[in-house]
Amino acid sequence: MTKRRAVWPWIVTGAVLLTAIFVVIGVKKGGGPRPAGVRVEDVKKGRVESWVRAPGKVQPERLVQVSSNIMGRVRGLAVREGDRVRRGDLLLVLDDERYRSASSAMRAALQGAQADLDLAEAQLDLSRQTLTRQEKLFEESLTSDESLQSARTEVKVAEARVSASRENLSGRRATLAETSKNLDETVFRSPLDGVITALNVEEGENVMTGTMNNPGTVILTVADLDTMQVEAEVDETDVVRIRPGLHSRVRVDAWEDSVLAGTVTTVGMSGRRGGQSTQQQATNFAVEVRIDTPPEGLRPGMSADVEILAGEKDSALVVPIQALTAQPERVWKRWQEWRAHPPKSKARRALAQAADTTKAGVNEKIVEGLFLLRSGKAVFVPVSLGLRGDTDVEVAGEVKPGDKVIIGPYRVLRALKDGDVARPEKDKAGKGKISVKVS
């Protein structure tokens, strides 16, 4: 038993030594960790399309929410939800007894005001005749000055009575017009050809009028379903590229496999705030996209996504979006200096490159560009960006068709330095691949 215990430490030690030997041999054969691999592709000319995507809701282009200007009880309904109506068709009727009585009373009051005016005008004629007689008698010295002045005063009083009677008659007429209008508004007719998409009352229910703070009862909604649109919420960074007339694609959730053609008709001028807090509020703008050929069964309120073609160009110089990278301006200037005067000390270059890995400051300028493969080395080239598509982006600068552009994960490109040696390899699929080694 003691001999077995004495042997076990030697066995464990031998196993550890063998493992260490195999690790050393593997490292020597493999040459250390493999460098990160990135792809390389040719810069080419092609078509690029820039699309703006936004969620929205399907809505009719013409929609009227019918509400009431008067209070009343629904006496009769002539339609149901889903009915198709024509302009002028009867929709519903409110109880009109109170408004009919008010209109009749006001007609009687108007007749009384007319009679008062006729009486005042007759009294004015009589006063004027009396004044004429008094003036003749005064010329013949057959009456006193007091009588003449009294006749003139009577005429002025009669004229004032006529004026007051006329104003009263005008007021009665205006009130009669209001009561007649209220009586007419107890009958509701369709304002357009369409479909009843919502009916919010039943026979016997009361409808309320709106006030400054409280909206009135929306009795029903009539919509023209022959012309449909999507009201989308577009981010403020994208809305500047959108204008009426742009071609669009509409995807309705109810038709997952269908893409509907559309056209931008309206771009909102005022932003809408959204979000949970003030700091997180995003500003969106309403953009209306008309659906060119609405399918049967498309209903208001359905969820949809719109894709608006904000820009397109043929024969544009394009590179994959994965090729884009950015460097602080100080780093780019140092690389330019190294091209003219390469550093003699590799240690100095390594220290400078280590310092370049720090993030750019808040106010530091960023230079956007690409890494091109030239003479076996990665060369950083600044570019200006144009239209941005789903996979490609338009570029302009010291780039031409046929140049080899390095493509890879952003974290790999971010660590790449101007002048790094790149060794082409072939992967199993035969595609070009670059292994980057820092020189």
Image (tube, rainbow, N blue to C red):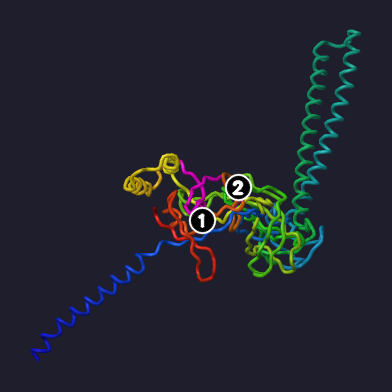
Q: Of helix, strand and loop, which mostly describes the magenta segment? A: strand
The residue singled out by tag 2 in the image is 386
Residue located 15% across and 84% down the image: 8
Give above or below for 250 relative to 21.
above
399 up-or-down from 252: above or below: above
Is residue 198 among the parts visible in the rendering? no
The image quarter containing residue 37 is bottom left
Mark 1 is surrounded, within 10 Å at the Cα level, by few (under 14), some (14 to 19) or many (20 or more) other residues, namely: many
Residue that numbered label 1 is attached to: 406
Q: Looking at this view, is 279 or 378 the one in front?
A: 378
Kindly report the distance in space between the C-alpha atoms of the residues bearing marks 1 and 2: 19 Å
Q: Residue sitting at 50 percent across and 53 percent down? A: 275
Tell me: 368 left or right of 144.
Answer: left
Spot occupied by residue 299 in the image (x, y as percentages of width and height): 69, 65
Residue type beneath disc 1:
Ile
Q: Is any atom of residue 415 visible in this view?
A: yes
Q: Do the residues labelled 1 and 2 touch (CB within 8 Å)?
A: no
Pick the residue in front: 9 or 358: 9
For label 2, the SS is strand
Which stretch is magenta? 362-388
Amino acid type at image mark 2: Gly
Left-right relation of 158 to 74: right
Q: List the single residue furthest toward the left.
A: 2
Front in this rendered view, residue 172 or 71: 71
For the residue labelled by badge 1, is the local secondary structure a helix, a strand or a loop?
Answer: strand
Q: Residue 313 placed where, x, y %?
A: 68, 51
